[in-house]
């Protein structure tokens, strides 16, 4: 025992000493002319995984750096790049205050080069993965965020619950924080969308988020940018990475062409494996009836005499049971479930000529949950993308979308409030059918 404790103490001591040998770099990044802080600037060590983004006051800190000589690089949209050699010593924090001078770099070229060509991606020091719209459709998910994790490396999604339309959390591979959110920024056609969850405090139901508004049929491509360098383009909100979604558009053509497409899809699913429940004994303890006690009728069901139960009020089917005679048992593990059906249909019109193009899509989605009733998700979406060329170097583009969603979510809970857990806790000799027959009236 003493030898084991001694070995454990030695391991902890070595780990503590090793952790103490790491260093850090901190400082503030400001405008060289005005002295104003530059929030969301990208600061990283060249050819390493170490990096950070400056906060609203311009301060930054890069922690847990292995001692050695590095090249510190700072980038900010519209400013000249900063580079400086830095030596990190064990257990010390190096302070490097950075002043950036305005440059000739504009936003548009940086966005294009950062996610447009592989050559320029490498210069940003960030990882970029691409997923096509056809790949998203082949996954079969109605939620775009869930489909990304199937096809893109380094992307992790967490389904909050199994309800249709429920929120999906997404995290990209990279540094994590225990105090702040780790979800990436989601950008659709250059516009950031709000991906926070809401609705958790309403009746113990699942949360939802706005990422369910995105119609997979509208997607042309998805690019995932990992690493702190993503903040150099999209600001501090992209410190955890960014998911850039580009929707479809028409094509320019020397001849006026119009393309019409009608699509429909329907599929069903079923419960993979029911939860095992015992059907040998009745409810409660001791095998004796105790009036006003929920813990009763713990007898072996097969030993009962058979026949209908004796009720306190014989004419009332929901009256208290006085004598338990019935040998009938019920499958509460499967009676609450159904084979849900999901269908969606869309109509798409696109086309263009040498001076403009357009893309129109209207979609209707109805997805049932696996719970017998009051569990579904419905979405109606309309998207219009129009582009017009007025001169050789003058273009105008309008992207517009209308989305309406509705959802019915199953009540959750670890007590009597939880619908599923309540069904599993029902005694095997209790007939739920009179109650389940009313669920059909709850369907919207």
Image: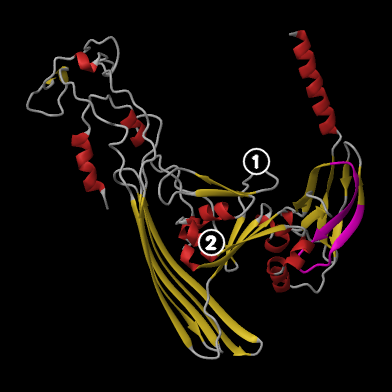
Residue visible at 65% across and 90% down in the picture: 392
Is there any visible trace of residue 353 in the rendered image?
yes
Q: Residues within 10 Å of mark 2 (few under 14, many from 20)?
A: some
Please name whichever residue, 223 or 13, is drawn nearer the observer in this view of the structure: 223
Foreground of the two, 298 or 79: 298
- Asked if residue 301 is positioned above or below residue 179 in the image, the reply reads above
Q: Position of residue 333 (x, y in %)?
A: 32, 32
Viewer-proximal residue, 34 or 69?
69
Crowd class of label 1 (few under 14; some 14 to 19; many from 20; radius 10 Å)? few
Of the image marks 2 and 1, the number of the one nearer the N terminus: 2
Picture disc at residue 135: 2
Can residue 311 be seen here? The reply is no
Q: Residue at horizontal 73%, vertical 61%?
A: 232
C-alpha gap between disc 2 and disc 1: 35 Å
265 left or right, relative to 296: right
The quarter of the picture where the N terminus appears is top right
Task: Measuring from the top left, give residue 229's x and y in whole percent.
Answer: 74, 57
Is the residue 191 above or below the residue 170 in the image? below
Secondary structure found at label 1? loop
- Residue 337 covered by magenta stretch: no
Instruction: Report x, y in % for residue 15.
Output: 80, 28
Give the residue drawn at x 61%, y 84%: 395
Residue 349 picture location, percent across and down: 43, 78
Residue mark closest to the camera, 2 vs 1: 2
Q: Is residue 438 above or below residue 358?
A: above
> Is 337 on the left-hand or right-hand side of 436?
right
Q: Is residue 69 magenta?
A: yes
Residue to which mark 1 is pinned:
179
Q: Which residues are magenta?
A: 66-85
């Amino acid at each position: 025992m003493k030898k084991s404790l001694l070995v454990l103490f030695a391991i902890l001591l070595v780990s503590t000493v090793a952790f103490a040998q790491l260093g850090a770099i901190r400082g503030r990044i400001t405008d060289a002319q005005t002295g104003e802080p530059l929030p969301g600037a990208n600061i990283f060590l060249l050819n390493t995984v170490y990096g950070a983004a400056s906060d609203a006051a311009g301060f930054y800190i890069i922690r847990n750096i292995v001692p050695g000589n590095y090249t510190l690089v700072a980038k900010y949209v519209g400013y000249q790049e900063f580079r400086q050699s830095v030596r990190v010593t064990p257990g010390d924090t190096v302070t490097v205050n950075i002043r950036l001078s305005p440059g000739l770099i504009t936003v548009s070229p940086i966005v294009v080069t950062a996610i447009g060509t592989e050559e320029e991606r490498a210069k940003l020091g960030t990882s970029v993965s691409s997923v096509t719209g056809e790949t998203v459709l082949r996954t079969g998910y109605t939620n775009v965020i869930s489909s990304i994790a199937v096809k893109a490396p380094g992307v992790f999604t967490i389904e909050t619950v199994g309800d249709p339309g429920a929120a999906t959390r997404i995290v990209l591979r990279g540094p994590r924080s225990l105090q702040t959110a780790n979800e990436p920024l989601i950008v659709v056609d250059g516009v950031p969308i709000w991906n926070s969850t809401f609705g958790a405090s309403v009746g113990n139901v699942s949360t939802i988020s706005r990422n369910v508004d995105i119609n997979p049929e509208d997607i042309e491509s998805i690019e995932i940018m990992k690493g702190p360098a993503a903040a150099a383009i999209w600001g501090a909100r992209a410190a955890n990475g960014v998911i850039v979604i580009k929707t479809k558009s028409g094509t320019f053509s020397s001849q006026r062409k119009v393309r019409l497409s009608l699509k429909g899809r329907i599929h069903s699913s079923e419960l993979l494996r029911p939860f095992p429940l015992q059907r040998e004994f009745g409810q409660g303890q001791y095998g004796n009836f105790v009036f006003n006690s929920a813990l009763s009728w713990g007898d072996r069901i097969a030993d009962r005499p058979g026949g209908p139960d004796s009720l306190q009020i014989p004419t009332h089917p929901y009256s208290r049971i006085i004598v338990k005679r019935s040998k009938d048992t019920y499958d509460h593990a499967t009676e609450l479930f159904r084979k849900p059906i999901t269908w969606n249909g869309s109509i798409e019109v696109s086309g263009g000529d040498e001076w403009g193009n357009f893309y129109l899509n209207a979609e209707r989605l109805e997805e049932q949950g696996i719970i017998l009733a009051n569990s579904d998700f419905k979405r109606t979406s309309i998207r219009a993308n129009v582009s017009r060329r007025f001169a050789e170097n003058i273009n105008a583009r309008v992207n517009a979308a209308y989305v309406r969603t509705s959802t019915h979510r199953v009540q959750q809970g670890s007590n009597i409030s939880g619908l599923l857990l309540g069904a599993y806790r029902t005694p095997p000799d209790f007939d739920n059918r009179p109650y389940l027959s009313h669920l059909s009236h709850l369907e919207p």
